[in-house]
């Protein structure tokens, strides 16, 4: 959807696991949405949700330390998997540590140290790319610490 305004895509996507992709030209999607009001509403809701999620993510990540960033990242993945019917406490990370660092604005070494620290604190267990969340409440508290301090609550 990032390509709608400039009429060209500003980023690339790489499938991290087997996927099916269905390319729908935007002009055709617009035409369908005009004729099917519930489709148009769903597209608007999806775009709005993503804008809000990305905006909040960027605001929070800018003020978080490395542990809070990684906790936020892991909880976000957990929630997304749960929404699709998968386990929210055990999953394989498809991204490399380097890619996670790039996404979180951190160096590879920082990401590796932070994984180790969260594991030492008993919040997670990591075996290669397999992550098990052992203390979800603790991880969420770590993730929400700045937000709670700054705003009194987190939604």
Image (cartoon, rainbow, N blue to C red):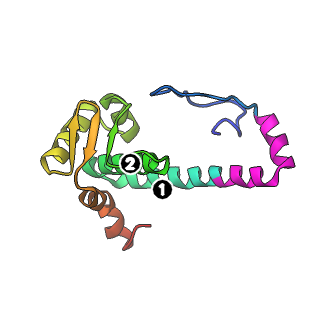
Q: Where is residue 78 in the image (x, y as percent from the top left)?
A: 38, 48
Q: In which quarter of the image is residue 63?
A: bottom left
Query: With 150 as the anchor, is 40 left or right in this view?
Result: right
Disc nearer the start of the sequence (2/1): 1
Dominant secondary structure of the residues highlighted in magenta in the image: helix
Q: Give the range drawn in magenta.
A: 26-45
Q: Where is residue 149 in the image (x, y as percent from the top left)?
A: 31, 69
Q: Where is residue 66 in the image (x, y as percent from the top left)?
A: 27, 46
Q: Which residue is drawn at 69% across and 28% down?
A: 23
Helix or strand or loop: what does disc 2 sit on?
A: helix
Query: With 74 as the anchor, is 12 left or right in this view?
Result: right
Q: What is the quadrant of the C terminus in the image? A: bottom left
Closer to the camera in the image, 11 or 128: 128
Q: Residue at x 43, y 50 (%)?
A: 82
Closer to the camera in the image, 8 or 122: 122
Q: In which quarter of the image is residue 2?
A: top right
Q: Residue 56 carries which label?
A: 1
Helix or strand or loop: what does disc 1 sit on?
A: helix
51 in the magenta segment: no
Would you name the residue on which mark 2 appears?
A: 78
Q: Residues within 10 Å of mark 2 (few under 14, many from 20)?
A: some
Above or below residue 100? Residue 57 is: below
Query: With 60 as the anchor, is 4 left or right in this view?
Result: right
Q: Which residue is drawn at 46% across and 47% down?
A: 85
User: Which is in the foreground here, disc 2 or disc 1?
Assistant: 2
Q: Where is residue 21 in the image (x, y as percent from the top left)?
A: 62, 28
30 in the magenta segment: yes
């Amino acid at each position: 959807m990032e390509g709608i305004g400039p009429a060209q895509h500003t980023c690339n996507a790489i499938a991290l696991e087997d996927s099916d992709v269905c390319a729908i030209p935007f002009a055709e999607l617009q035409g369908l949405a005009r004729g099917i009001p519930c489709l148009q509403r769903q597209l608007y809701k999806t775009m709005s949700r993503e804008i809000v999620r990305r905006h909040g993510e960027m605001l929070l990540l800018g003020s978080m330390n490395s542990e809070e960033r990684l906790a936020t990242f892991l909880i976000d993945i957990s929630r997304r998997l749960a929404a699709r019917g998968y386990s929210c406490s055990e999953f394989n990370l498809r991204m490399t540590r380097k890619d996670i660092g790039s996404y979180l604005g951190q160096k590879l070494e920082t990401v590796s140290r932070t994984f180790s620290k969260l594991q030492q604190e008993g919040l997670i267990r990591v075996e290669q790319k397999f992550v098990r969340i052992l203390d979800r409440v603790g991880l969420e508290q770590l993730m929400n610490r700045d937000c709670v301090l700054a705003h009194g609550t987190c939604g």
